[in-house]
Amino acid sequence: MAKFTKKKSGELPAVSTASLPDIVFMLLFFFMTVTVMKDDELMVENVLPTADQVQRLDKKDNTVVYIYAGKPHPRYQDKYGTAARIQLNDKFAGVDEVAPYILAERAEMRQELQPLMTTALKVDKETNMGLISDIKQELRKVNALKVNYTTKEGDAMRNLE
């Protein structure tokens, strides 16, 4: 006759870890798809002018460098006033800081992308043209001659209102 043995009570079966890699990769892909890369915090008011002949600028390989200009946002007006200012990355800057900023951005690019660098000016429509021409003069000093003016698509005559 065969002997019957009782199962030892109180012991838990081993936890299966076979599905653990699947769960880890599923979480990895989830976070990769929902994560948003940080853009510059806009510290100036930026109501873009409208234009009727616009073209989309491809931001391939990070060859576009943005310069923002406009009146400081109301939360910064106590410290910086209400006159139009230049914003480079996440800080206010003077006109004399534009050329070193462009040179630093160009130096961070790969060698083959440096000639393709485009400077995009995102300028508030109420900003004086004097500040824009000062920025353009600084860009000429460092031979950053590819300049793009960012606008909204619409009727250009509405800018005169």
Image: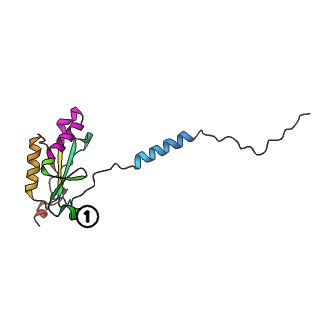
Residue type marked 1: Arg
User: Which element carries disc 1, helix, strand or loop?
Assistant: helix
At 76% across and 46% down in the image, what residue appears? 10
Query: Residue 160, position in %: x, y?
Result: 10, 64
Report the front residue among 19 and 75: 75
Residue at 15% across, 56% down:
52
At horizontal 12% and vertical 48% (from top left) the residue drawn is: 96
Left or right of 20: which side holds 146? left
Report the number of numbered marks.
Answer: 1
111 drawn magenta: yes
Q: Quadrant of the N terminus?
A: top right
Rendered location of residue 76, percent (x, y): 23, 62
In front here: 150 or 65?
65
Q: What span is in magenta?
A: 98-117
Q: Position of residue 22 (x, y in %)?
A: 53, 41
User: Colour mode?
Assistant: rainbow
- Residue 83 drawn in magenta: no
74 relative to 144, above or below:
below
Residue 5: x %, y % from top left = 84, 38
> In this figure, which residue is indicated by the disc labeled 1?
75
> Furthest residue to the top?
111
Q: Residues within 10 Å of mark 1 (few under 14, many from 20)?
A: few
Q: Is residue 28 left or right of residue 58?
A: right
Task: Report whether 34 appears left or right of 72.
Answer: right
